[in-house]
Image (cartoon, coloured by chain):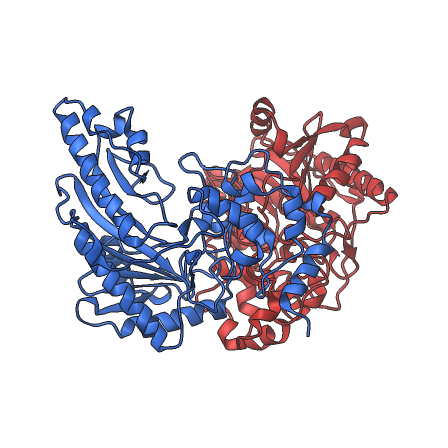
Chain colours: A red, B blue
Amino acid sequence: MPFGNTHNNFKLNYKVEEEFPDLSKHNNHMAKVLTKEIYGKLRDKQTPSGYTLDDVIQTGVDNPGHPFIMTVGCVAGDEESYEVFKDLLDPVISDRHGGYKPTDKHKTDLNHENLKGGDDLDPNYVLSSRVRTGRSIKGFTLPPHNSRGERRIIERLSIEALNSLDGEFKGKYYPLKTMTDAEQEQLIADHFLFDKPVSPLLTCAGMARDWPDGRGIWHNENKTFLVWVNEEDHLRVISMQKGGNMREVFRRFCVGLQKIEEIFKKHDRGFMWNEHLGYILTCPSNLGTGLRGGVHVKLSKLSTHPKFEEILTRLRLQKRGTGGVDTASVGGVFDISNADRLGSSEVEQVQLVVDGVKLMVEMEKKLEKGESIDSMIPAQK
Amino acid sequence: MEKISDKMVKLTLKRLSAEDEYPDLSQHNNYMAKVLTQDMYKKLRERATPSGFTIDGVIQTGVDNPGHPFIMTVGCVAGDEETYEVFKDLLDPVIEDRHGGYKPTDKHKTDLNSGNLKGGDDLDPNYVLSSRVRTGRSIRGFSLPPHCSRGERRAVEKLSIEALASLSGDLKGKYYALKNMTDAEQQQLIDDHFLFDKPVSPLLLASGMARDWPDARGIWHNDNKTFLVWVNEEDHLRVISMQKGGNMKEVFTRFCTGLTKIESLFKERSHEFMWNEHLGYVLTCPSNLGTGLRAGVHVKLPNLSKNTKFEEVLKKLRLQKRGTGGVDTAAVGGVFDISNADRLGFSEVELVQMVVDGVKLLVDMEKRLEKGQSIDDLMPAQK
């Protein structure tokens, strides 16, 4: 990004102690890991595109901690960040992804047929189902660091690829820059429109620069498959629909995603991926599958039960408010999704959501009838 | 050993061509957008300052903030003293446009002798609620807030604390670091209207000035609570003299005395302020060059502000209105912040004189309108 941290060598005029951030009030993964020693070792390094350690950690320095979730506190500026700054990022990844080791291998499974069930979550409770992931286009730097030129090429390549889709995936691209008021209203009504980020977690990392240049939304005519271009990642791919048929959502997700990847490959563009980290994305929390499969579900009784958090932990699920990653729940409706991203496959993660949500809805029904759920508490998955 | 500026230029040029990288300024309305052509952008991306500040750093805030409903924003900032030289192709025209035709060859005069101010001690306190003079100062040898590292910022803080600790008499005071302020101290500073918060204005955030908050930021004020210094907010130092009521002369006298004393304390420690005879005092925002001085009052003008000639009167008096919450806020309850519009090309005394004379006239006009009388005969000539 243009300001502050890319004059790396100038800062070497100051000692490590003078430049080391004050993390005494901080509570994020980066702050737990970054010592003066690691800072001293990495501070004169840069990726080939010029991304530095201070760039990686700026969002974590500026955002000491979050009331609802343990934030990561660091981002990648390009694919090479994960290698050049591994002394910081490997421990962060291990901490965030349940002990994932630098030598571990990640498996990718986008074969939707491998999912068992998932087509019968009770729509009286499960209001909507959604699966999203991100993809980064190899050879370009990532949103915290990329230039206007790079962002525009990513947009152009994405539009070309998406315009080749047909059948249930046939759709249209809406650039944020030239959207009409009518289009904007419609996209808001459909809950598709993404806005300029307001979360300081994102803005401090430089992801909102030059907004809305190079940003846009593509969706299919059926409004069940959606791609965000140049928001927090190069691409965010989303499959969603009302009700509880997660199976259908996941099918469409896998089929669409693979079609998109094929088209990119035909033009000699791959997605950033390796056998250790899986799909490479901006935030270390999204490595691996980058997949968040979730539902908006009514759990007004269960959510006030003393064992709610424990149940979620055992099911390897995570709760959020319905407004996004750093919001609170409203009216007993929760966003429940898989907590894991790395070290398990797409199918495995969606299976956890499907099975876990089914169980929680049954618990909710029991509690509604005033019955106990003690016998239903699951074992740790 | 490769120079830092050369390294930064190389990284810049590693990106795509100037044409591919040139920002879309079609929806924009700020001084930077009016001036920056694609050719100029192409030329300037081949340069960087010795500390590594680039053209993209200069313009980012203007790209991210297309325009403002209340004021014409500048849309560019300096990352260090050399920015104004290395990127003069952009900044000279911006300066000229923003500062009433100020030419690259013009010289700026500094006059901090408060004895030269005529009057200013009798603005009617029934209308003039408070008076305030502020300026900024940058310490030579350090990068500016959009670009500085934590180490630099902390060095600026340390030097400032040492210098301010030597002030005595009416100026004797204490430093409160934002980082370890107690709740009680914080509440007191809020009640005194002294506390500055982490910037929320996108104009400042987009240029990187809020990085690492609140590290090395703090507030110093004298025991009498009439003289205040902000450390590492939008500039290295913001120096403020203020009090309730309309005695601008006293406010300005304290301002000049305090500022001059602070400057000599820095010089004793072998540090000087960034200053040159063309741009005067060098600050982060090109709009604050010259004197960096904003002298103003909070004044009740509910009738005058609704008069159709209000804007014209302000313009003729070389004054500017703001809401009482700061540069990008709206007025509330008929109370306006009225201050000098100019910064560069006029001395400190000249600017405060314009405020004193102008506000006196505005209050006279307000009183006329209250009585339902005309103000036509009071209309000033263009200053």
Position of residue A61 measured from the top left corner of the image (x, y, whole percent): 51, 62
Instruction: Report the number of numbered marks.
Output: 0
Quadrant of the rendered image containing residue A217 = top right
- On the rendered structure, is A16 left or right of B223? right
Position of residue A143 measured from the top left corner of the image (x, y, whole percent): 64, 50
Q: Is residue A22 visible?
A: no
Quadrant of the rendered image containing residue A244 = top right
Say which residue appears at 53% left-offset and 55% top-offset. A310
The N terminus of chain A: image quadrant:
bottom right
Say which residue appears at 70% left-offset and 47% top-offset. B18
Nearer to me, B374 or A162: B374
Position of residue A165 measured from the top left corner of the image (x, y, whole percent): 80, 32
- On the rendered structure, is A170 left or right of B176? right
Nearer to me, A12 or B374: B374
Position of residue A122 measured from the top left corner of the image (x, y, whole percent): 61, 33
Q: Is residue A245 visible?
A: yes
Say which residue appears at 30% left-offset and 38% top-offset. B383
Nearer to me, B216 or A258: B216
Say which residue appears at 23% left-offset and 43% top-offset. B298
The C terminus of chain A: image quadrant:
bottom right
Quadrant of the rendered image containing residue B13 = bottom right
Vertical relation: A146 (above or below) B383: below
Vertical relation: B317 (above or below) B77: above
Vertical relation: B269 (above or below) A174: below
